Image (cartoon, helix red, strand yellow):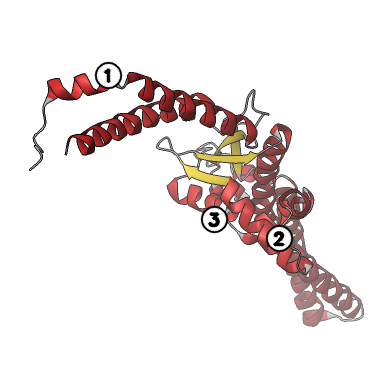
């Protein structure tokens, strides 16, 4: 019956006796790993860091009320950061990036109809683009491609798309309100003109009532025009939806694959495997 107990001295002796085999396996493993890491494509990573802006700053009161415009913080809360994350993670955002940077040609998905190829390119981009919330309340957007400039361009464009979509919501709301106010002003002006013509041919109490109503309409028109001008100015001076703390720039070197790390891991794995192989072989020979 073979002895299955562990003997450290005997184990060391076996390893010393078979050191050439161990060295051969380690060298072969390191060479194979080195050749592999230099043959596989290199990937470059670019990252942008942003924080959310306070959506309260989009309120028109910040421009026309001196008592409150300085009370708002420029930075948003965690909920506001979640909204930015939600915009960034929309399929609409990824599809726009795929189209603008011709990523169907870059990823070269299987031959299929254009909509299917576009969908596959979006999936590839989702794997290569990460959006992470940091402990400092920031949003880090990173992209991996085998073209350092493309990685930076994709990230910076995503930041711009988030900015555009975020501010477009407020612009749409204020533009819609402005349109409704202008319609109301036009209706009041028409009413004022009709009443003015009517009052011009009346006398006595009717004339006085008509003049009072004209004064009321004139005041309403002035107020509506003032509000419309405020909405117009606010729509033209919308604050940013986010602030860019760090713009994505082309990477100085490829970060994938991690050549030193892979080669070192291969060396350790080769050493452990060869040691186990030598010990098992020696034990089988003694059995």
> Which quarter of the rendering shows the N terminus?
top left
Mark 1–mark 3 distance (CA, rounded to whole Å): 62 Å
Q: Nearer the viewer, mark 1 or mark 2?
A: 1
Q: What residue is disc 1 on?
A: 17
Q: Secondary structure at mark 2?
A: helix
Gap between marks 3 and 2 measured at Cα: 19 Å
Return the x and y of residue 63 as percentages of the image width and height.
64, 43
Up-down: is 255 above or below 234? above
Badges 1 and 3: C-beta atoms under 8 Å apart? Answer: no
Residue 266: in sight, yes or no? yes
Q: Position of residue 103 (x, y in %)?
A: 74, 51
Q: Nearer the viewer's eye, disc 1 or disc 3?
A: 1
Find residue 42 and report its image quarter: top right
Q: Quadrant of residue 209?
A: bottom right
x then y, percent, for residue 125: 63, 51
In the depicted view, which residue is nearer to us: 223 or 128? 128
Separation of marks 1 and 2 at Cα, in angstroms: 80 Å
Q: Nearer the viewer, mark 3 or mark 2?
A: 3
Question: From the image, which quarter does the C terminus lie in?
Answer: top left
Asked if residue 230 can be seen in this view, the reply is no
Q: Position of residue 58 (x, y in %)?
A: 61, 49
Instruction: Give the structural element (helix, strand or loop) at label 3.
Output: helix
């Amino acid at each position: 019956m073979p002895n299955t107990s562990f003997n450290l001295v005997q184990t060391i002796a076996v390893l010393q006796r078979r050191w050439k085999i161990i060295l051969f396996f380690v060298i072969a493993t390191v060479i194979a790993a080195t050749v592999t890491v230099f043959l596989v494509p290199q990937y470059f990573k670019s990252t942008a860091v942003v924080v959310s802006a306070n959506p309260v700053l989009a309120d028109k009161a910040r421009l026309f009320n001196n008592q409150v415009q300085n009370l708002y913080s420029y930075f948003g809360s965690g909920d506001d950061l979640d909204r930015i994350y939600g915009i960034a993670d929309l399929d609409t955002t990824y599809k726009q990036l795929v189209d603008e940077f011709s990523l169907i040609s870059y990823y070269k998905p299987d031959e299929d109809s254009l909509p299917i190829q576009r969908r596959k390119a979006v999936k590839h981009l989702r794997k290569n683009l990460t959006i992470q919330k940091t402990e400092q309340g920031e949003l880090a957007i990173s992209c991996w491609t085998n073209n350092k400039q493309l990685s930076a361009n994709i990230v910076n464009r995503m930041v711009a798309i988030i900015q555009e979509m975020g501010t477009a919501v407020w612009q749409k709301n204020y533009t819609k309100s402005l349109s409704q106010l202008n319609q109301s002003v036009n209706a009041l002006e028409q009413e004022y003109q009709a009443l003015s013509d009517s009052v011009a041919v009346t006398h006595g109490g009717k004339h006085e009532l008509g003049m009072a109503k004209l004064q009321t309409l004139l005041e309403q028109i002035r107020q509506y025009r003032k509000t419309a001008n405020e909405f117009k100015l606010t729509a033209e001076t919308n604050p940013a939806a986010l602030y860019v703390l760090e713009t994505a720039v082309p990477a100085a070197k490829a970060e994938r694959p991690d050549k030193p790390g892979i080669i070192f891991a291969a060396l350790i794995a080769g050493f452990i495997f060869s040691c186990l192989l030598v010990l098992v072989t020696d034990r089988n020979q003694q059995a």
